[in-house]
Image (cartoon, coloured by chain):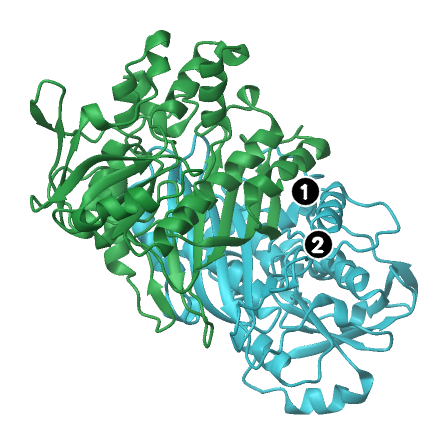
Chain colours: A cyan, B green
């Protein structure tokens, strides 16, 4: 879930308004049903249908025009791809296999039938939806922009699901892929670079407009039995890592030099490290594994999957997230990713990179 | 699903734009998964988790400010009740028991924390959500009005699910409750009657602002084994009955004199029959039962449930829906309920009563 009802157990300092609301909702409406494994508070909710062999997972994410996307920066098909991908990323983050999804669309006048059909070509592209099938939804009219809300359902494999809350002090922290690439793509779009033809430019635009959920890697990581906790990086490492720490009741220290940044963005007047920490919308996986299993994990992780990089470790400093900078200086990592309720709604384009405007 | 991806099998004449899109989507993305019983095309999708005893159902419905509601006409708590109720109505329409739901909220600046918490008091009121539990969702900012998208999950009982498509020529048509009451409530709101103190006025306002999904009746009708097909009345009888007829490959004739109208609306400059036929948002159940079982059905239907009324019958005139008027004259029933893509989006308040402005 993009800005999900999530992980808001203990929040010692300066809660964001959004986090505070989520915390209150989690506290009020925590799991009661015997069929429910996990309600509010993770990338997806987890339940077990009576007599079923596997757990089922459900997650919801919305994309709003003017907040999360601009029509002129993408195509309906790409938008469909992104809308389903951000949902499948939540299932990937728990190691689940995507099965079904519903799409709720609200459209302003002037959006053509062709646009809707192209959008759904995107949501249903086989290489994107990874076997998940469109099974319903609703259509309504909008008085402002396009509103997309998708709910995805998935199934565990052998009941192995990874939560945010399993991290322990001493665990090593990893991420998949490269961080800050999507934010770099947004930066390009903002500066009119939509036609960018450089390889790095195309890569950044692709990461922003059609991010790839890490479904296969997520399933592998859940199945391997070597990982304690996992989540996806939707709002930025500086926002999401504290969520994992709060859920697990631990602290963390990460090393800036070890974070896999998107170096090419330096050429576009960006700080790759800033984008990696605060950019958001990377939809990579963040996970923690016990130190004793680290070597086995790294050696057995399939080479064809997006690479994994060790970026730091969990510790006993509950609720504290620190960043070790290049010179060895250690500072508290400020949460500067996207918060919908702190963001000024003045025509910003894409949510999680809110801080690009600062 | 409010304007669901639904039942658009054959559409011989004058497809509405919305119906046409739904028809195209159903054709393109019809059921493929072996776990799927019913995809696009009914009130909810139906799937069967591996090894599970029961079917599971999922449905999605959105409410948009300025289209489906006005903030000044309701309270956050009432709005929460309505938002969950319209989803549970879809589960009721197939005879399923509600279990879980997720809520995707997009809120403009200025909506307070208190508003959100009150809204969720409404979505989670035990007598409203009938045992269903809030298990997740997402929160984002909106540049225009409040946007609510709920997805509800339910479970069958003894795998008995009623679809729209099971109607047969000769079946008798029934509805629960009274039709046109919600539209009368909207009419009152529009004319400034929010403070109406008459009993009928309060009843109409309640029907519009906090409709009651017919969960118990829906489950009973699915369990009794005497009903061929069922759906809920969300967009108006004149729109929804043709949907049932198309799905079942039949025609229908209903008798105006037999329709349970909300007679009190005549005193507010309304035509109760018009509101019953075209008003929408009644969230009553429409169902068909074989003539041979009609007496047994009527006699065994629990007296504590909303009354059921026989309004006509299905016939072999595929795709034709006729209305027998008071004088015996028979005319084709024009579809004048709500269509999101035909509606003028000029500040209308509540969807399905669009035609009130004609």
Q: Nearer the viewer, mark 2 or mark 1?
A: 2
The one nearer the camera, A348 or A51, is A51
Residue A93 falls in which quadrant of the image?
Answer: bottom right
Disc on res. A357: 1
Q: Quadrant of residue B317?
A: top left
Image point (64%, 39%), residue name: B120
In the displayed structure, does residue A348 sit left or right of residue B210?
right
Q: Counting other residues with Cα less than 10 Å from the Cα at mark 1, is it few (<14), some (14-19), or many (20 or more)? A: few
Q: Earlier in the sequence, mark 2 or mark 1?
A: 2
Question: Does B330 appear above or below A354?
Answer: above
Q: Work out whether B131 lies above or below B204.
A: below
At 49% from the left and 50% from the top, the residue drawn is B151
Residue A165 image offset from top left, x and y in percent: 75, 67
Against B267, is A39 above or below?
below
Residue A30 - label: 2
Question: Is label 2 on the same chain as label 1?
Answer: yes
Towards the viewer: A61 or B177: B177
């Amino acid at each position: 879930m993009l800005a999900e009802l999530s992980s808001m157990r203990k929040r010692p300092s300066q809660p964001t308004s959004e986090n505070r609301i989520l915390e209150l909702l989690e506290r009020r409406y925590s799991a009661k049903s015997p069929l429910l494994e996990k309600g509010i508070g993770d990338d997806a909710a987890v339940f077990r249908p009576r007599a079923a062999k596997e757990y089922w997972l459900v997650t919801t994410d919305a994309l709003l025009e003017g907040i999360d996307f601009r029509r002129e920066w993408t195509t309906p098909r790409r938008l469909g791809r992104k809308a389903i991908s951000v949902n499948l990323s939540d299932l990937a983050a728990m190691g689940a296999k995507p099965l079904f999804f519903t799409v709720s669309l609200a459209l302003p006048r002037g959006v053509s039938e062709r646009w809707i059909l192209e959008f759904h070509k995107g949501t249903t592209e086989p290489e994107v939806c990874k076997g998940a099938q469109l099974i319903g939804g609703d259509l309504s009219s909008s008085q402002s922009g396009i509103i997309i809300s998708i709910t995805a359902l998935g199934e565990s494999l052998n009941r192995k699901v990874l939560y945010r809350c399993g991290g322990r002090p001493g665990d090593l922290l990893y991420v998949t892929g490269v961080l800050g690439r999507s934010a770099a793509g947004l930066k390009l779009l903002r500066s009119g670079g939509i036609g960018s033809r450089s390889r790095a430019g195309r890569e950044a635009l692709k990461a922003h407009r059609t991010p790839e959920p890490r479904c296969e890697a997520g399933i592998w990581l859940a199945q391997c039995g070597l990982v304690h906790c996992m989540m996806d990086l939707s709002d930025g490492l500086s926002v999401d890592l504290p969520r994992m720490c709060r859920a697990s009741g631990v602290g963390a220290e990460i090393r800036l030099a070890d974070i896999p940044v998107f170096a090419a963005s330096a050429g576009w007047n960006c700080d790759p490290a800033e984008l990696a920490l605060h950019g958001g919308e990377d939809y990579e996986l963040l996970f923690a594994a016990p130190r004793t299993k680290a070597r086995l994990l790294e050696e057995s992780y399939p080479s064809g999957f997006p690479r994994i990089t060790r970026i730091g470790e969990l510790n006993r400093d509950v609720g504290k997230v620190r960043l070790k900078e290049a010179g060895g200086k250690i500072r508290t990592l400020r949460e500067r990713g996207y918060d919908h309720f702190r963001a000024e709604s003045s025509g910003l384009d894409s949510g999680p990179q809110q801080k690009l405007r600062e």
